[in-house]
Amino acid sequence: MIKGSKEHYQKFVVGELLKAFDAKSPMAVPRLTQVTLNMGLGAAKENKNVITEGLKALGVVAGQKAVPPLAKTSIASFKSRQGMPIGVKVTLRGQKMYD
């Protein structure tokens, strides 16, 4: 059994959480719904290749395609403009989250 697997979580971690929260049912225990991996790339302002390298790197780590979030507002002190890519992120759900 792998330590980070879903079976490990259900068998061991839920039992410990039941004791910690004094819960009567396993359904009363908090559970994971998603895991988000993100990477801020400040150097992307000057060099656009940094974003593509970040997308590849995070895609390899996560096992699925990453997306570049865009800046919501312009911030002059950070030299970022609205709509510029500012990093990369990927959201893992289901079995990939436990893997």
Image (cartoon, rainbow, N blue to C red):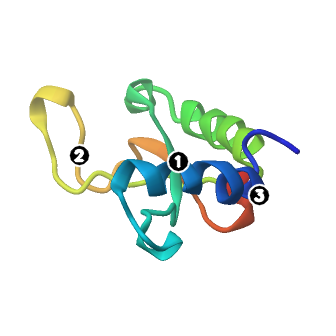
Image quadrant in which you'd find residue 6 = bottom right
Image quadrant in which you'd find residue 42 = top left
Q: Kindly identify which numbered label has been placed on residue 16.
A: 1
- Quick check: 76 above or below 7? above
The percent coordinates of residue 64 (x first, y second) are 73, 56
Asked whether residue 64 appears in the rendered view, the answer is no
Q: Residue at the far right: name it.
A: 1
Q: Specify the amino acid type for callout 1.
A: Glu
Contact? badges 2 and 1 (CB < 8 Å): no
Asked whether residue 73 appears in the rendered view, the answer is yes
* Left or right of 57, for residue 88: left
Q: Secondary structure at mark 1?
A: helix
Structural distance between the alpha carbons of marks 2 and 1: 47 Å
The percent coordinates of residue 96 (x first, y second) are 73, 59
Q: Specify the amino acid type for callout 3.
A: Glu
- Quick check: 39 above or below 29? above
Q: Kindly identify which numbered label has been placed on residue 58.
A: none
The percent coordinates of residue 67 (x first, y second) are 55, 56
* Left or right of 53, for residue 23: left
From the image, tell me which residue sits under label 2. Answer: 81
Structural distance between the alpha carbons of marks 3 and 1: 14 Å
From the image, tell me which residue sits under label 3. Answer: 7
